[in-house]
Image (cartoon, rainbow, N blue to C red):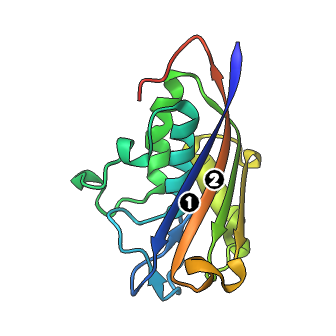
Amino acid sequence: MPEVRIGWGYDIHRLHPGCPTVLGGVAFPDFPNGFNTHSDGDVVAHAIIDALAGALAVGSLGDHFPEDDPADQDVRSIEFLERFRPVMARVRAEVINIDCTVFCAAPRIAPVAAEMRANIATGIDCDVDRVNVKGKTNDGFGPEGRGEAISANVLVQLRIETDSEPDG
């Protein structure tokens, strides 16, 4: 019998001058600040993996893709979604919904939200109509509102088969 599980994910990265910015697999080459991280620092992809792992009770992003793994140096984080699929397949997990909110003063999310949705849906292998992405500026409050950082909150709903257990 199918069971519905919910997972929540969060990630935040400080912005650094001259570093690249990637969100939901979309690069922002004209944005002057970005993430100085092991991978491309895509907080959207990172938060989605955390949410999926949470729903399946198999840890977090770092458990599956450790920061000290040289194989993941400069990797596109959206690729982590595809690489997480086997964990989901072991329990026949299906995405019901992914809802992502990106918090940043800039860049603007609305003009690229459809592209981000498509990248996420392709990465995790679900219908694009099951993925939502929206942006909030925080109206100048906090590190995101002051343009010092970008964060993402993600809520996922999964349908899984209860006759099998995830094993990370």
Q: Residue at x 77, y 47 (%)?
A: 129
Q: Say which of marks 1 and 2 sits in front.
A: 2
| Image quarter of residue 96 | top right
Q: Residue at x 48, y 75 (%)?
A: 21
155 lies above or below 103 = above
Residue type marked 1: Val
In the rendered view of the protein, which quadrant contains the C terminus? top left
Task: Identify which residue, 1 or 78, lies in the foreground.
Answer: 1
Task: Identify which residue, 67 or 81, lies in the foreground.
Answer: 67
Residue 45 image offset from top left, x and y in percent: 52, 56
Q: Look at the image and tell me whether residue 35 can be seen.
A: yes
In the rendered view of the protein, which quadrant contains the N terminus? top right
Please give the residue where the numbered disc 1 appears in the rendered image.
44
Residue 19 image offset from top left, x and y in percent: 39, 81
Q: Residue at x 69, y 21 (%)?
A: 3
59 left or right of 150 in image:
left
Q: Earlier in the sequence, mark 1 or mark 2?
A: 1
Residue type marked 2: Val
Please give the residue where the numbered disc 2 appears in the rendered image.
154
Residue 105 image offset from top left, x and y in percent: 63, 82
| Image quarter of residue 109 | bottom right
The mark tally for this picture is 2
Q: Which mark is residue 78?
A: none
Element carrying mark 1: helix
137 lies above or below 96 = below
For marks 1 and 2, give the CA distance.
Answer: 8 Å
